[in-house]
Image (cartoon, rainbow, N blue to C red):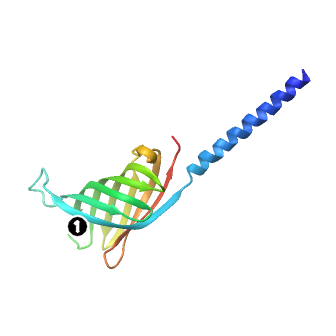
C-alpha cells in the first residue's frame, strides 16, 4: 500500500510539473508584443448612397505596411469635417493581411478617430475573434503616428492567445 501511495504522489507531481510547463508556454505565447514600422496609404473617394449629403464622405483605403508587420490593409472609411479647419471624425474598417512576428494570417482593425483643432484622438483596435491563420487569437491596439513631413508610421501593441 505504501509503494502505491508513493507512486501516486510521484505521478501527481510529474503531471503537475507538466501542466505548469504547458501553462508557462501558453502564457509566454500570449505576452504583449509591440510591432513598429512605416506604412504608405492611398485614400480615394467612393460614391455614397446619399449623394446630396455633403457633410459625410466615403473613402476606400489601401495601405502597405512595412517593418515588424509586412502586409497590406484594405478598407472603407466614413468621414465628416467640422466647420473649423483641423476638426472632424472618421470611422473605418480595415482588413490587414500579412506577416507579423513570422506568423501569417489576417485580422480586422476597427478605427474611430476624432480631430479637434489639429489634435487627434484615435482608437484603433483589433476586432475580437477576427484573426485567421497563424494570427488566430490576436488582439491589440494600433497607434498611428503622422510626422510633420506627412509620413505615416504605426505602433501596434498586440498579443496572440493560443487557440
Residue found at the far left of this picture:
52
Q: From the viewer's side, name the closer residue of 49 and 98.
A: 98
Q: Which residue is found at the position 78% from the left and 31% from the top?
A: 11
Q: Is residue 39 left or right of residue 56?
A: right
Image x and y of residue 107, in percent = 38, 49
In the depicted view, which residue is nearer to us: 151 or 58?
Answer: 151
Q: Is residue 23 left or right of residue 4?
A: left
- The location of residue 150, given as percent across then percent down, is 31, 75
Q: Is residue 88 above or below residue 147?
A: above
Q: Which residue ends up furthest to the right in the rendered image?
A: 2
Name the element at disc 1: loop
66 w.r.t. 13: above or below = below
**Residue 156 left/right relative to 50:** right
Task: Please identify the quarter of the rendering in which residue 81 is found.
Answer: bottom left
Q: Nearer the viewer, residue 86 or 157?
A: 157
Could you say where residue 117 lies in the image, as x and y percent from the top left?
30, 73
Residue 104 vs 54, above or below: the answer is above
Residue sitting farthest toward the bottom:
149
Residue beneath disc 1: 82
Question: What residue sits 82% from the left and 31% below the top?
Answer: 9
Image position, residue 13 (x, y; %): 78, 36
On-image quarter of the N terminus: top right
CA neighbours of label 1 inside 10 A, class few (<14), some (14 to 19), many (20+): few
Q: Nearer the viewer, residue 83 or 25?
A: 25
At horizontal 68% and vertical 43% (from top left) the residue drawn is 21
- Asked if residue 3 is positioned above or below residue 17 in the image, the reply reads above
Amino acid at each position: 500500500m505504501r509503494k502505491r501511495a508513493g507512486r501516486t504522489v510521484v505521478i501527481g507531481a510529474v503531471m503537475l510539473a507538466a501542466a505548469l510547463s504547458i501553462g508557462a508556454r501558453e502564457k509566454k505565447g500570449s505576452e504583449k508584443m509591440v510591432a513598429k514600422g512605416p506604412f504608405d496609404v492611398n485614400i480615394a473617394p467612393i460614391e455614397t448612397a446619399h449623394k446630396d449629403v455633403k457633410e459625410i464622405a466615403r473613402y476606400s483605403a489601401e495601405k502597405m505596411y512595412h517593418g515588424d508587420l509586412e502586409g497590406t490593409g484594405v478598407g472603407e472609411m466614413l468621414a465628416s469635417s467640422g466647420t473649423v479647419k483641423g476638426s472632424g471624425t472618421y470611422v473605418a474598417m480595415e482588413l490587414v493581411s500579412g506577416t507579423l512576428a513570422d506568423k501569417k494570417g489576417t485580422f480586422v482593425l476597427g478605427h474611430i478617430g476624432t480631430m479637434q483643432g489639429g489634435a487627434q484622438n484615435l482608437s484603433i483596435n483589433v476586432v475580437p475573434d477576427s484573426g485567421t491563420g497563424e494570427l488566430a487569437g490576436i488582439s491589440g491596439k494600433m497607434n498611428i503616428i503622422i510626422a510633420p513631413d506627412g509620413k505615416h508610421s504605426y505602433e501596434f501593441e498586440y498579443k496572440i492567445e493560443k487557440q
